[in-house]
Structure formats: structure tokens, C-alpha cells
Image (cartoon, helix red, strand yellow):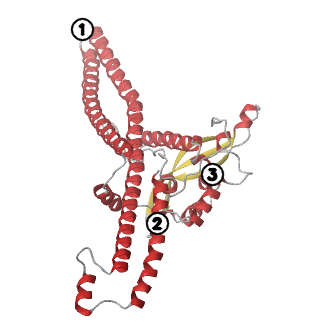
Amino acid sequence: MMADTGSDEVAVIGNTDLTPGEIENNIKNTMGDQEIVPLRKMEINVAEAEKRTVKNAVNMQETYTVYLIETRPAEAASEGTNPTPDSLWRRYSEFEILRNYLLVSYPYVVVPPLPEKRAEFVWHKLSADNMDPDFVERRRVGLENFLLRVASHPVLSTDKIFFSFLTEENGWKEAVLETGFQAKADSRLKALNATFRVKNPDKRFAEMKHYGDELQSVISQLLRVRARVADRLYGVYKVHGNYGRVFSEWSAIEKEMGDGLQSAGHHMDAYAASVDDILEEEEHYADQLKEYLFYTDALRAVCRKHELMQYELEAAAQDLSTKKQQQEELATGTVRTFSLKGMTSKLFGQETPEQRETKMKVLEGQIQEGEDALKEKNTECE
């Protein structure tokens, strides 16, 4: 059940790459219609997982897992009624599309992470197969946590696309693709370029990124160590399990020591079973550590977005400075720095007053556009 925040005000954070018209449309998507039930008053469950096999475009069998999402008004539970929940099936890839849309649309929000697509940091007994029933069950729990966290967020929960993900089985994917979020997604190469070329990084985001990097490194190392320890404990389990079987078989052919050997065999079996239980319990703690690990990626994504915006701000300021310098040189007729334009003027003579006036008007328009763009970038970075 979603907790009520006690406030009807919603802070709308849109994509910083959007035009004014797209921003207005994003606000409409965020606020939604009045008749939409607030998600904080809705119960959301990922009730079960189901394996399906279909033939793909090249007429080959494809096996995948779908998850049943159930929603119902929270008021029904408080009133003692139990209506049939609305339900629909979603693939993991659809959850990925939803999260990528949220990342692009809300660059200042740490969007909750999804559970792992394939098992990582596994130990010997744990299957790395993404169709393994235990793995599918852990992923089901992780997907439910993802939906609950998004639904409890004061900004993300009001997004119209997110609501349709929960309530509209058909047409949802087409609706989210129509937003054009994929074209607005920043490439990793572009973000990496901004990281190395930004001149005045924001100390707050730099510290946050450093914290995320350190936390990711520590948790990754902890999970690797845990996997190695689990392998050793699993080896102990195997050894004692084998001893238990040997002692039990030995007791059947030994007359004088039969009871003692059988008792020892039972003791070995019990010890092996206890080690197995410990490893299964630890797997739940490992899943929680992985959530923290994936949250570091979400945190660093926000920092990368800010670095990219800071780089674009500095580029806009540099471009405006260059335009103003060109305007000054054109007005005074002097060139302060070496340029091809200066060499051309010396070789072919100065421009006519009409040419200078035309260029001045063009530069004035470019400078005005540059000042507006710089003001907008400053606002975005605040």
C-alpha cells in the first residue's frame, strides 16, 4: 500500500533537453488527469511469474518470462472489501523501457534500479541461468520493489506513462515510444567526453559521484568475497553430506558399531543441511547488497547528466564570448587574435560598410540567442 505524503503539491522536473512545447507536454504527462486514481492510494503487486515460449520473426522458438502485475484501490482493503484486482502481464524488457523513459524524463531524480537481468556474483550451487526458478522468484520480488518505490516517489508516481504501464496492457509501448525519449537519451561517449572536458565541475556533484564510485567498488568487492566464502561453505556441505552417506551405508554392514555409525551419519546429514540453510539465508542479504550496488549506478547517472549540462553551459558561454569578440573586432576594424579572417582582410582589403553592417546584424541576433541559451543553461544547472 502506498503511503500518503500529506501534500497535494507536486514538483515537476522535466527533461532539460526539451523545448518549451515539449516541457509543457511533459508537465501534462506528469500531472495526469483528475480522474486518475493517485498511485499513493493504490496497492501494487507483482503476483507471479510465468515462462512462455513463442516463435520469433525467424521462426525459431524463443523462451522468456512474463510477470503478472496486479493493482487495486487501497480504499477497498480499508473498507473490508476484496474486489478482483486489475491485472496485466509485462516482460522484463518492458520494465527496462519504463526505467529508461524515467531516466531521460527526470534527469535530477535518482530513479530506483531494476533487479539484475542475469545473475551476477554467483557461487557454485547458485545457477546463473536467468530461467532458473529461484532466480526468477528473486527477480519478481525485485520488480515489485521497483514499482513500489516509483509509485511512492512524489514526482515519478504522478507520471502518466507510468500509470499506463500499470493499467494498460495494450498500446503502452507505442505510447512511451511516441514520447521520443530514445532520441533524447545521452550517449555514454558524450557523457564521458563531458567528464574530461568540463572546466568547473560542481563540487556537490563531484563529491556525490566520488561517493558513488567508492560505494560501488566496496560493495562489488564485498559481493565477490561473499561468493568465494559461499563456495567454501558449499564445499564443507558437500564433504559432510558425503560422510553422512558413507557412515549410513557402513552402519548397515557393521554389527557392533552399526548404531554409532548410523548416529554419526545422521549428525553429518544434519550439519550439511544446516550449512545449506545458512547459504540460502545469506542469499537474501546478497540481494539487498546488489540493490545498493544498482542504486550507485542510478546516483552516478544523475551526476553524469549534471556534468553533461555543465559542459554544455561552459560551451554556450565560450560561444557567446567568441561572438562578442567578433562583434567588437567588426566594430573597431581590428583583429586581436590571429585568424583566417585577418589574413583575408590583409590580402583582399577591408569589407565594405554594407557588408560590415549586415554581419553586425547577424552577430547581434546570434549574441541575443546565445545570451538566452546561456541564461537557460544557468537556470538548469542551479
Kindly identify the residue that appears in the image at 35 percent across and 58 percent down.
191
Residue situated furthest top in the rendering: 256
Residue 232 against residue 214 in the figure, above or below:
above
Instruction: Say which quadrant the N terminus sits in.
Output: top right
Q: Which residue is mark 1?
A: 257
Label 2, residues with CA under 10 Å away: few <14, some 14-19, many ≥20: some
The reply to whether residue 117 is in sight is: no
Q: Residue 210: x, y in percent?
A: 32, 42
Of badges 1 and 2, the one in the foreground is 2
**Residue type highlighted by circle 1:** Met
Q: Splitting the image into 4 quarters, where does residue 242 fall?
A: top left
Residue 215 against residue 86 in the figure, above or below:
above
**Residue type highlighted by circle 3:** Phe
Secondary structure at badge 1 equals: loop
Label 3, residues with CA under 10 Å away: few <14, some 14-19, many ≥20: many
Secondary structure at badge 3 equals: helix
Mark 2 or mark 3, which has the lower sequence index? 3
Q: Which residue is mark 3?
A: 163
Per the rendering, the mark at residue 371 is 2
Of badges 2 and 3, the one in the foreground is 2
Mark 1 or mark 2, which has the lower sequence index? 1
Kindly identify the residue that appears in the image at 37 percent across and 54 percent down.
307
Left or right of 75, for residue 344: left
Q: Splitting the image into 4 quarters, where does residue 177 fall?
A: bottom right
Q: Residue 304: x, y in percent?
A: 38, 52
Kindly identify the residue that appears in the image at 38 percent across and 25 percent down.
277
Residue situated furthest front in the rendering: 332
Q: Nearer the viewer, residue 331 or 306?
A: 331
Q: Are marks 3 and 1 in contact (CB under 8 Å)?
A: no
Label 1, residues with CA under 10 Å away: few <14, some 14-19, many ≥20: few
